[in-house]
Amino acid sequence: MTGSLVQHAVLLSVVLFTLGALGVFLRRNVITIFMCIELMLNAVNLAFVAFSRSLGTFDGQVLVFFVMTVAAAEAAVGLAIVIALHRHRDTLDVDSFNLLKW
Amino acid sequence: MFAVDLRPLLPALIVAITALVVLLAQAFTPKGSRSPSMGLTVTGLAGALLLSLTMAADARYGRGATTGGTYVADDFALFFHVLLIGLALMATLLSPAYYRENGGERGEFYTLMLFSLVGMLGLVSTTEMISMFVALEIMSVALYALAGTRRDQIESQESALKYFVTGAFASAFLLFGMALLYGLAGSTQLARVARGVASASPEQVPLAVLGCGLLIVGFGFKVASVPFHMWTPDVYEGAPTTVTALMAAGVKAAAFGAFLRVFPGSLPALREEWVPALAALAAITMVIGNLGALAQSNLKRMLAFSSVAHAGYLMSGMVGQSEAAGQAVLFYLVAYGAVNMGTFGLLASLSKGGREPLSLQDVAGLGERRPALAAALTVFLISLTGVPISAGFVGKFYLFGAAVNAGYTSLAIVGVLMSVVSAFYYLRVVVAMYMREGEGEDAWAAPEASARLSLLVAVVVTLGLGVWPAPVLDLARAAALAL
């Protein structure tokens, strides 16, 4: 029972991770791209928790706490950068940030 | 009885405390009076450097000690400690003049740079994946902000955004790789992961290989290898030049440190799988990096592509057998670090009143008007090309030697051919400095004493390692053996 549960969880995590990665490439709004990256991180969290449960070790769950903390710190810095850019350009469309060739 | 040996953490702790002190000192310095940031930063870094050297000299002071099985002060970590703290010191000496000339002179640079250094030191010292991830993020998050420190300049902001998006994206890949290896081994300790992978059952092997692949993607972004290099030219161009110097020299060194610990250090069981992948990446990285650099007219962009190319050279060394490969990569990181800090630092210290020397025309006539600086830049460019008597030559010799010994002769051939190609775009700068007439007035600043000291160190290291590489090679060998 636990075995198949873990398999399903990891499968779901792979799907979420792929969706997030695709979103980073396909979306044009910085905030949406940022949300896609968060989705990828949370997909990883799901995998860690699932593995942790099936293996009976706590390393994975500890890591999840660190990932959440780091994601919060990243969000703070990332949004600050977005605001700083928004002051120069009144848009959040990545295609308009083309001063340096992407 | 539960005792934790904190000695391995001390250098990083000193740097972290310095960062906090600088932050507070900034807040309590009255407006108009001279800021103590630089003095404090230099003192703290010098202390950390001395401590690392003492630790490296004697086991009594912590050489070989571990903190809770996750953070070690082995020869490998201490080698990188000395290198990284040294690079940070050089960046600190170069920065104040640059920021004064280009605006945005604030204390944040020092604090963020020091926090980033804490992450770099952690990255090369951890033997466990949770701390490795946290260290990587400490380093990266501080750098995202550093890239945007020229608030008035939209290029700087844009560079920060691009670095942030690609960096966070790469971290997610790295994490997913770690998750798969954890699922296999049941532990985040690299030593346990190594055992888990070595004893994996046949149906578990694909999982391990996939985990390895995702880790290569993650590290590939951080060391700027093709096809994960798209961010490099933009970020290097837009970021303040001294920050670019730190990114090119320090981040690359720290990321390769972790790369070495994870791959040759902990996944030797999967050599069959990752060595060919790494060799292929190294080859295309060398080719695209060098060809990309050929097409650039902006010096910072050219050096960014050159940094991509050098990631390729370094990766071609990594395909070799663990110890020789480690020695070659470590030696080259020292050579490359000093040279890059010197090149970017020199460009930064020439900038005057918001105008940076960015095109060939901007450095034309430098040989006549600033002979010493032109000579220094020539030394750096020669070393980047890999001409004998420079550190770059000895480094490349060992890197390609490691590749040949591992049976990848073709990789070495690609590397040598590409080095020849690279001579064209490096020497173009030298030609412009000496052969072309500059514009009428003198558009360059005179570097101040601290910047000159930093550049002098870079020149001495570059030439010193080229003429007499034996001591550093021995140290690099000892460090590689500790893996």
Image (spheres, rainbow, N blue to C red):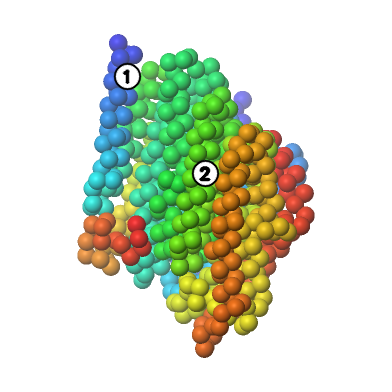
Taking the image as shown, residue A38 lies to the left or right of residue B255, namely left
Q: Is residue B23 above or below residue B271?
A: below
- Depth check: give the residue in front, B94 or B197: B197
Report the mark closest to the observer, 1 or 2. Answer: 2
Q: Chain of mark 2?
A: B
Q: Residue at x 47, y 31 (%)?
A: B212
- The dot on residue A72 is none
What element does badge 2 sit on?
helix
Q: Which residue is mark 1?
A: A7
Q: Residue at x 36, y 44 (%)?
A: B169
CA neighbours of label 2 inside 10 A, class few (<14), some (14 to 19), many (20+)? many
Residue B132: x percent and y percent?
50, 38
Work out whether residue B126 can be spotted: no
Q: Amino acid at mark 2?
A: Ala
Residue B123: x percent and y percent?
54, 43
- Depth check: give the residue in front, B427 or A7: B427
What element does badge 1 sit on?
helix
